[in-house]
Amino acid sequence: MILDYTSGKRSRIPRDDTDRKAIKQLALGQYGYAVNALYLKQTVRDELLQKVCRSINEECKELCSTKSPSVLRDVSPLGLKQFTETTHVAELATRAPLLYAVLSSAVGKNPTVKKDLDVQQPNTTSEQHTKIVPPISMAASILLKSRCPQMSAQAYRLSTVLWHSGAKKQVS
């Protein structure tokens, strides 16, 4: 393989078959195959995991920011009344796509298939919608509340529903 630097050309020999396959597939524009080949290497996996974790951390910082507050920050009576899990998940899908993809995968939904659940349609009542949205919303709100205590709209809403439903005892 010849690398063309501004200081001149250099010849490099790929270390193993995986590297050769990945380089060939990149040159041919077959990026999916190149990623699959490179994913077999533990060092690449570790680097990808670190990159994904940093990206999710940045997404969560943005969601917890007061400059552009999340729907989870609005604990006013009107905010709690208007809070819906669908709105929350739609916000996650737009503002934190990696976090949304991880949580969607955890509940068994392939996040690359956008037809499964249109989070932009709050009135969707499909069976898949009712199975997927609540756990994604609850998991995200618990994780974000542990990061930033002000992200508590879902917790307030749930405790209000429990209180008005007759729950009198707190179980520890």
Image (tube, helix red, strand yellow):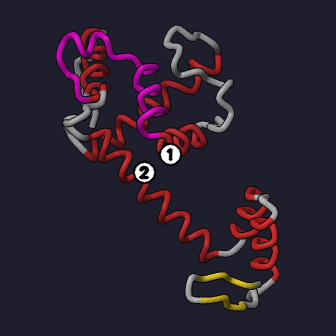
| Quarter where residue 171 is shown | top left
Q: Residue at x 64, y 16 (%)?
A: 127
Give the labeled residue for mark 1: 98
Relative height, residue 49 to residue 89 (above, below): below
Label 1 Cα crowd, 10 Å radius (few <14 / some 14-19 / many 20+)? many
Give the labeled residue for mark 2: 56
Q: Residue at x 24, y 23 (%)?
A: 156
Q: Position of residue 147 (x, y in %)?
A: 27, 47
Q: Quadrant of the N terminus?
A: bottom right
Label pair 2/1, CB-CB below 8 angstroms: yes
Q: Residue at x 48, y 65 (%)?
A: 50
Q: Type of residue at label 2?
A: Ile
Relative height, residue 64 to residue 2 (above, below): above
- Report the span colored magenta: 73-96
Q: Position of residue 122 (x, y in %)?
A: 49, 13
Is label 2 in a helix, a strand or a loop? helix
Relative height, residue 1 to residue 22 (above, below): below
Label 2 Cα crowd, 10 Å radius (few <14 / some 14-19 / many 20+)? some
- Give the Cα distance between marks 2 and 1: 6 Å
Q: Position of residue 121 (x, y in %)?
A: 53, 14
Residue 82 part of the magenta-drawn span: yes
Is label 1 in a helix, a strand or a loop? helix
Q: Position of residue 65 (x, y in %)?
A: 24, 40
Question: On residue 86, which mark appears?
Answer: none
Pick whichever of labels 2 and 1 is earlier in the sequence. 2
The kind of secondary structure the magenta stretch mainly shows is: helix
Q: Type of residue at label 1?
A: Leu
| Quarter where residue 112 is shown | top right
Does residue 27 appear to the left or right of 95 in the view shown? right
Does residue 113 appear to the left or right of 65 in the view shown? right
Relative height, residue 70 to residue 12 (above, below): above
Q: Residue at x 46, y 20 (%)?
A: 86
